[in-house]
Amino acid sequence: MPSTSTNASQPANSRGKQAQMVVNVNDAYGRIPPHDTDLEEVVLGAMMLEQGAEIDVLNILTKDSFYKDANAKIFEAILKLSSAQQPVDIYTVVEQLSKNGTLEEVGGAYYVASLTEKVGSAAHLEFHARILQQKYIQRQLIKISTEIEGRAYDPTSDVDDLLSYSEKSIFDLANGNIKTETRSMNDVLKEALDQIGEAARRTDGLSGVPSGFTSLDRITQGWQNSDMIVIAARPAMGKTAFILSMARNMTVNHKVPVLIFSLEMSSVQLVNRLIISETELGSEKIRTGKLDEREWLQLDTKIKNLQDAPLYIDDTAAISLFELRSKCIRMKLQHGIGMVMIDYLQLMTGPQEVRGNREQEVSTISRGIKQLAKELNVPIIALSQLSRNTVARGGDNRPQLNDLRDSGAIEQDADIVCFIHRPQYYGIMQDAEGNSTEGLGQIIIAKHRNGATCDVNLHFRAEFARFEEWNSMGLATGLAPLDDSGNIVQSYESSMNQAATPPDVMPSDEPAPF
């Protein structure tokens, strides 16, 4: 069969005839996978022609990137030499092939030597390598598509399993071919200084996405791009209320586009909760629509704050990691999303091959969310459930990092881990200093990769499912102590860690109305 590859150095009319030949061959024998063996030889020859040229290629190509088996074996020999920090040239490659026992399989020393005659220099080596990688990806897509087609024709195939296999195969291929370039210190330093300058120009002094709670933002400096933030609590602590309060602040007050994935509640239910919080009308009135004239006016007036808010809600149940990633990328391109929220992590669906092993499934989901935050360069907040350890422990029932449910990978992957703790829920009406805990919603920052760990006191309005500043009620602020320059001088834990009288009745796992 004639060669189907083309060489860029051939005249246009020659290449046109060869293209026609490829069409004829395809018609006669079926379609041939995308490849260019001539270019493979050019890349291998350039790697042996100039010392150190292989460095530009080894982070782009793998052995599988080569269509011709002989070329793949030669590349493998070059890779071994480079890994051992040995020079790469015709003689060393021939010697390595001989050690591997594959010299005769590739065509002997003559074929290896002939490769350097096909190229004048390594000037365009990286560009040529990327062309080969593109053809490899095309071949892999054809392979995956063929496998999916075969499974789809099989009447015994489960459709859900087939969809899971399909999305994972495409996701793994895409994920495995996303490589970031190594950057110099000078380049990164300029970007860091630009970010510092941008933060200095902001009137709020924050470097990240503001939560809308001054006491919390003073600790975090806003939620930072590429960070994965885990907010965990037992049922009925107000996890959804907390992220909705932040989403409202971000979109209405700061015009930051926010995307919420609501796996537990429908989009209408979520918006109803926002309406209740914004209008301060009771949930029963909103659900039944039994409003008097004054209340209708109040609804119409206050709802205008939400109408133009750049808030987007996706209520797909049991969304997969692949689907989450696809939707986030699309929304980032279309609407410039600056924050993603997931309610909640344990309701997501992991890849098919890890289902049945809950810890491994949650670990895969957690790792995927962190990778997505880096890829999008936006903060992602993922809600998480806590185990019953907090209830069984008694005392003040204050959550700890080892209470995170299903997987320790959540703690490992997260840049920030926050817990929501409401002492009043457990029957604790005063702290150790005699201060009232009525309405107190503590945000416990238990892990902070780039900052202090401490407690932030907020006020929880249960009747409106809303969090507010604690000091707005004329109560203690709960701020971390700062020096004269506004820097945090120490971290502290709440006095709630001290001895407290356990509640008479242990709380159930049933969620509260909000």
Image: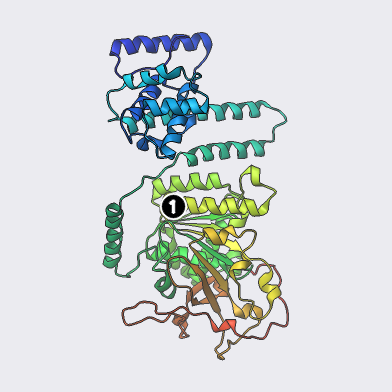
Which quadrant: the C terminus? bottom right
- Can see residue 81? yes
Residue, x 36% and y 45% (percent of image)? 181
The x, y position of residue 65, in whole percent, is 46, 29
Colour scheme in use = rainbow
Image position of 13 with respect to 439: above or below: above
The x, y position of residue 193, in whole percent, is 27, 60
Mark 1 highlights which residue?
Answer: 374
Residue, x 64% and y 43% (percent of image)? 352
Answer with left or right where residue 256 lies relative to residue 173.
left
Residue, x 60% and y 72% (percent of image)? 399
Foreground residue among 445 and 11: 11
The x, y position of residue 145, in whole percent, is 56, 28
Foreground residue among 14 and 467: 14
Answer with left or right where residue 506 lies relative to residue 123.
right
Residue, x 66% and y 26% (percent of image)? 153
Q: Residues within 10 Å of mark 1 (few under 14, many from 20)?
A: some
Circle 1 sits in a helix, a strand or a loop, which is it?
A: helix
Image position of 9 with respect to 125: above or below: above
